Image (cartoon, grey):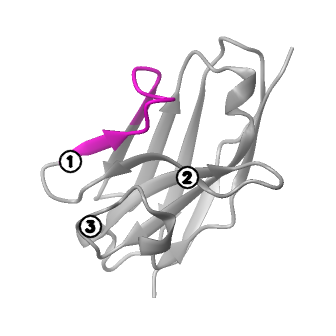
Amino acid sequence: QVYLVESGGGLVQPGGSLRLSCAASAGIFSTMNMGWFRQTPGEEREFVAAIWWTAGITYYSDSVKGRFAISRDNAKNTLYLQMNSLEPEDTAVYYCAATAATYYLERASGYEYWGQGTQVTVSS
């Protein structure tokens, strides 16, 4: 079992930055592929970014590419999402997720473990 707890959300003005963290239970975090998703009311969960446990290969949705950066610290069992140049359209609940799958990491259905989410609100 993998337990995930997100933190770092909050209210930020357009153009601002936030860094989300996702603390994972120890044990197998270092061998799990990880992703960030976001969701707004009435919408499906949307892929944001993913990172493979080997070589730290990353993958981003087009909507955040160049503004967000996903990273992981396996020694600390922690996943991060650095969000820069935030826009009102980035407002959502952000979730981290873990999977043993290797492909299709942009699909929410492929993840076995999820955190409870953290709210990010971008507004002036």
Q: Is residue 66 magenta?
A: yes
Query: Residue lying farthest front?
Result: 43
Q: Amino acid at mark 3?
A: Ser
Instruction: Assess disc 3: are there few (<14), some (14-19) or many (≥20) residues with their C-alpha within 10 Å of its C-alpha.
Output: some
- In the rendered image, the vertical position of residue 86 relative to residue 5, given as above or below: above
Q: Which residue is mark 2?
A: 37
Horizontal relation, residue 36 to residue 33: left or right = right
- In the rendered image, the vertical position of residue 57 relative to residue 10, given as above or below: below
Residue 5 marker: none
Which region is colored magenta? 56-69
Q: Which residue is mark 1?
A: 56
Cα separation between marks 1 and 3: 11 Å
Cα separation between marks 1 and 2: 18 Å
Instruction: Assess disc 1: are there few (<14), some (14-19) or many (≥20) residues with their C-alpha within 10 Å of its C-alpha.
Output: some
Q: Which residue is mark 3?
A: 30
Say which of 22 and 100 sits in front.
100
Which residue shows up at 40% across the image and 20% down it?
Answer: 66
Cα separation between marks 2 and 3: 19 Å
Q: Main secondary structure of the magenta part?
A: loop
